[in-house]
Amino acid sequence: MSLGALVPVLAVVLLLSGCVNQVQQPKTIETIKIGVIAPMSGDAAAYGEQIQRIVDFYTPKVNEVAAKSGKAYQFVIEDGKCAGSEAVTAYQKLVTIDGVKFVIGGFCSSETLAMAPLTKDGSALLTSYGSSNPAIEGASPYTFTFSYSDEVVGKTLAREMSKYERLAIITEQNDYNVGIQKVFLDELKANYPKVTVVANEVFPKGATDMRSTLEKVKKMAPAAVLLNPNAGTGITLVKQMAELKDWTAYTLFGQYVYVGETALAAAPELTNGMTVVDAPSINNPELTAMMDEITKTKGVITDVGTYYTASLMDDMKVVTSLINEFGNDPAAVQKALKERTFSGFISNNIDFRNSSFPGVAGGIYKVIDGKAVYQQ
């Protein structure tokens, strides 16, 4: 074959070789770290363990979508211990050492309220999946929460308990519970003047002995009692109430702690019939299937419950979808959060345009045979 005849043949071979190399070149994937703050130790550690199970389960689903944009996410979990100072330490570690620009958390309001001021410079965006204290509203332009607001819970509790003339409230001393207490008492004073609060007792955060507090409340003979503790202490509180006995004349009310089956199982006879105000019920077959799969493959998530499972996955989905679109840029993602609405498990209209909260209402539950059953 002549040299002239070889030239076009070689050109074709080289062209095909180049095409093969182009096809075989792997696509560059940018790995982005996102911080997650949860109570991995302390009284609320059971929640932290279950939150980690949800994050571990949902991460591959997030990354499946992210791969189309050339991205992958690594979620770095730090312990906020349901305490402000610990959450600040965890946040600073994530931002300065791990280099994250987005933090999902905290779960407890004390965590989120302590971290919010650190985000004001826009160096990182904080999106909580569980904090509900009304003080989060406007705490920082770079702090949002996918939770409902305690204002809704406190007002709903006041309305439901206004059927009784003599009320008592037992509150744990921390941001979440004090927020509920304030809204509850303010609402009673403003709209239900015939109701008298005969006992308004507060016990220290993480207390292990509430017997003296319970005795004080019992002596005042209220018709209804609002139990307003945090996660771990909620179990101790009902156990000690059951030990004191003779609480059958009092109608019990509670908040999210008593939606979880663990707390209810601690004193089943006492808590049966309790009215609980928490997040609205979510009837979504896809969410139900995912929760079943998490339970089978990772472990139980009954204490975190339906709403906070949904809000955590919505938080992960919304934040990563915006990073996929705008890059690892807190300012651009914050702007999009404030300008758009989003569809998720907690709502088809997650709306941060005029609030740090997503615009979700509360729900009323009745404890029947050890389970909190949604009423309305």
Image (cartoon, helix red, strand yellow):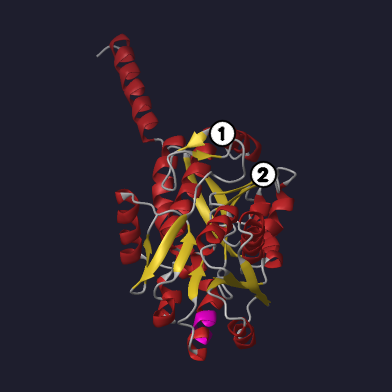
Residue 130, quarter of the rendered image: bottom right
Left or right position of 151 against 22: right
Q: Looking at the picture, how far across and down is residue 79, in whole percent?
A: 60, 66
From the image, state whether disc 1 or disc 2 is nearer to you.
2
The question of residue 349 being in magenta is answered with no
Q: Nearer the viewer, residue 321 or 289?
A: 289
Residue that badge 1 annotates: 326
Q: Main secondary structure of the magenta part?
A: helix
Q: Looking at the picture, how far across and down is residue 207, in whole percent?
A: 63, 81
Q: Which amino acid type is shown beneath numbered disc 1?
A: Phe
* Measured Cα–Cα span from mark 1 to mark 2: 16 Å
Q: Is residue 374 above or below residue 139?
A: below
Does the rendering let one see residue 29?
Answer: no
Q: Magenta region: which residues?
A: 236-240
Q: Nearer the viewer, residue 62 or 259?
A: 259
Number of other residues with Cα within 10 Å of mark 2, as a class: few under 14, some 14 to 19, many 20 or more: many
Left or right position of 369 against 188: left
Q: Looking at the picture, how far across and down is residue 365, in whole percent?
A: 41, 62
As drawn, which residue projects farthest toward the front?
194
Image quarter (top left, top right, bottom left or bottom right) of the C terminus: bottom left
Tell me the element at label 1: helix
Image quarter (top left, top right, bottom left or bottom right) of the N terminus: top left
Residue that badge 2 annotates: 142
Which residue is rendered at x = 41% and y = 36% of the image? 68
Which residue is rendered at x = 56% and y = 51% of the image? 34
Q: Is residue 232 above or below residue 119?
A: below
Left or right position of 114 against 317: right
Q: Nearer the viewer, residue 94 or 104?
A: 104
